[in-house]
Image: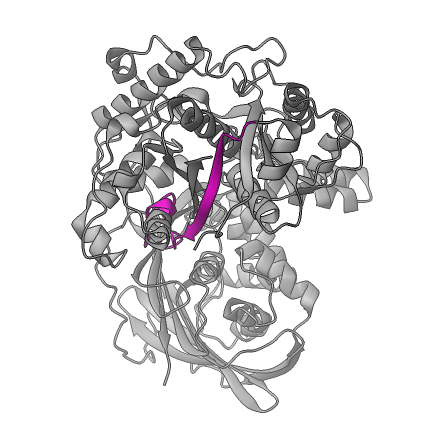
Amino acid sequence: MSTPHPRAVILGGNRIQFARSNKQYAKASNLDMLTSALDGLIARFGLAGERLGEVAGGAVLKHSKDFNLTREAVLGSALAPTTPAFDLGQACATGLESVVSLTQKINAGQMESGIAAGVDSASDAPIVVGDSMREILLELSRAKTLPQRAKIASQIRPSYLTPQAPSTGEPRTGLSMGEHQAITTAAWQISREAQDELALASHHNLARAWDDGFFDDLSTPYLGVTRDTNLRPDSTPESLAKLDPVFGRKLRAPATMTAGNSTPLTDGASTVLLGSEEWAAEHGFTPLAKVIDAEAAAVDFVDGAEGLLMAPAYAVPRLLARNGLTFADFDVFEIHEAFAATVLCHLAAWESEEFCREKLGLDAPLGPINRSKLNPLGSSLAAGHPFAATGGRIIATTAKHLRLTGKKRSLVSICAAGGQGLTAIVEAA
Amino acid sequence: MKMLPLYAKAVLKALPLGTAKTGPMPSRTIMRSVPIEAASYAGFTNVVGAGLGNIVHPGYLHVLAFPLSMQLLSDPEVPLPMMGMVHIHNRIDVHGPVRVGDVVDLHVRLDGPYQHKSGTTLDILVEGKVDGVVKMVETTTYLAKGRTLPEAKPRAGIEREEFTAPTPTAVWHLDPIIGTRYARASGDYNPIHLSGLAARGFGFPRVIAHGMYSASRALAAVDTRLEDYRWDVTFAKPVLLPSTVGFAITEGRRHEAAKFAVFDLRKGRPHVLSEVSELR
């Protein structure tokens, strides 16, 4: 059950505009982007020189030199250098887990304020050579004579030189996230049209939000980028329909997943300011919303028993049951769009009597979600998905949206690599 | 033991010089105590993608016995040529865990020859004991294609089940160097796994992966937690390198009894069909 009286409130957020990988932020490191996003938040809330309780953050694609990434970002930011920080990781749920983790610390009375953060660069990613190349390089370093070296070097094939980064491949299956999703998409018979429709809604909703100035106090332009660069406001059903499928081309079912209804590799960083109600009042900050409860789930995808990205379908019903809520109690559904099909598979699962009975042990399906309540300000298909930064983007967006519209409750759901998912209930403060 | 001279000797023996030797299979047993050393074992787990834990992957027990098997097979009294023989089946019965640091007392002997629809087979029988307790019993079956021996005994062939390739739950991208890497980890330097020229000499278009590499990697993926089990492997088409192959569990589950396969992604033909079943 959620905390009897949660003290922790969401006060705001700041992110840098997300950019497609290898474009505007190609030369920016995780540390650069995270520090920039932090500094933007600190400037907006006048926190320069303040010592906060803790800053939590992480990145999915991490250099070994990034071992203390969040602490390094704090040291490079305007915060007091006496602000502690820690790194955490739960793949694409990293950003949301940092929000949940700090919320619980504040609720427990352990601290009064904190910043939850996340960053990822798919451009300045750690380069790792494949096992074959690694083997050859190690052999070369052991070889003593020139002829020995020449002989060993002759084993190098051009394909070995391809760096293994960045990759969304699952270590245990060798399949990319897209290929995994394609199998699930086929199993749930999600149509190309339905996926394109969801992608289109994401672009239109995000474009409207930018046009309305919704993100003006949730973002700080970085390196000349003033809007998420993946956003295509002029997308049409026709332009999306023209794209060739990129995933699931070897499956028996028709391939439906394209670059248009899948998220691209993206660079970006996000932050969320959290504090106790008292701390917020002392600083004159208006609480936007609260994280009431959260639930993580994981599925056994390794031998194909469940789809890689289906964990949220299991987490949400457990979260609802614990809080005595149904879909009807929610005004907003923020379901991370790893792929359009991921969201549609979750919706289909919750509508399926068979799935809800056999997999979730429920008497009745959870039922449908009103599409007008789904990702009303766009989501990852339009904004892009810098893995660990997505949670912070969603939390700040939905918290402000609840405050602005007077709506009450939002359900947040993020799927993650390794068959994981993290979900949370956010309520207006 | 030096494997390369042994192969050189075997290659010479495979050449069509003089008449093929006939006669009974030598009944010699080789016994040797082999300690399982962490560093060597890590070399094996690293290549086949198994976790490096205290309990030893049975594929490594096969590796330990391998030089002894080759020593027996290269005996001039063996009526079949070692080179060109094809590993078609492998069965290991595991009776409780063998651990890193254990000393395995290996008894290796030959059995056969047996008639086979495509030639003649012989078995290598391995028994592995730790502190006097039998921990593994292995039967490795080799086929000498197109060879018939008057003294070969009849034996019921192992029926291969109809195989329809499922959706792969994993794909393996295999570089040519995997042959060299497994050779180094296993001591099996058969040139068909190392050199394209040698592979062509034995009728393969390219270098082929060691059968026990694919089989051991597949078992590592199933990651069985059974204590006493039988691990059966049937080798179908060899895996040419480089290639990308599919893997799937076709019956059962990871950590439990299961049937599983490594197969060609395009044509769906099997490379390795394997099964883990509980003993007792």
Displayed quadrant of residue B29: bottom right
Q: Residue at x 23, y 46 (%)?
A: A366
- A383 lies above or below A303: above
For the residue pair A38 and B55, the one nearer the viewer reads as A38
In the image shown, does A23 or A33 lie closer to the viewer? A33
Task: Please determine whether, in this image, residue B21 is positioned above or below residue B86.
Answer: below
Question: A81 left or right of A269?
Answer: right
In the rendered image, is residue B152 in sight? yes
Magenta residues? A286-313
> Farthest residue in the right direction?
A144
Nearest the viewer among A78 and A347 is A78
Q: Quadrant location of residue B255?
A: bottom left
Between A425 and B87, the residue placed more toward the observer is A425
Residue at screen point 60% across, 67% down:
B53
- Is the N terminus of chain A in the top left, top right, bottom left or bottom right quadrant? bottom left
Magenta stretch holds residue A312: yes
Residue A350 position (above or below residue A397): below
Residue in the image at 64% along x and 73% along y: B100
Residue A340 % position (x, y): 32, 30
Q: Is residue A35 left or right of residue B87?
A: right
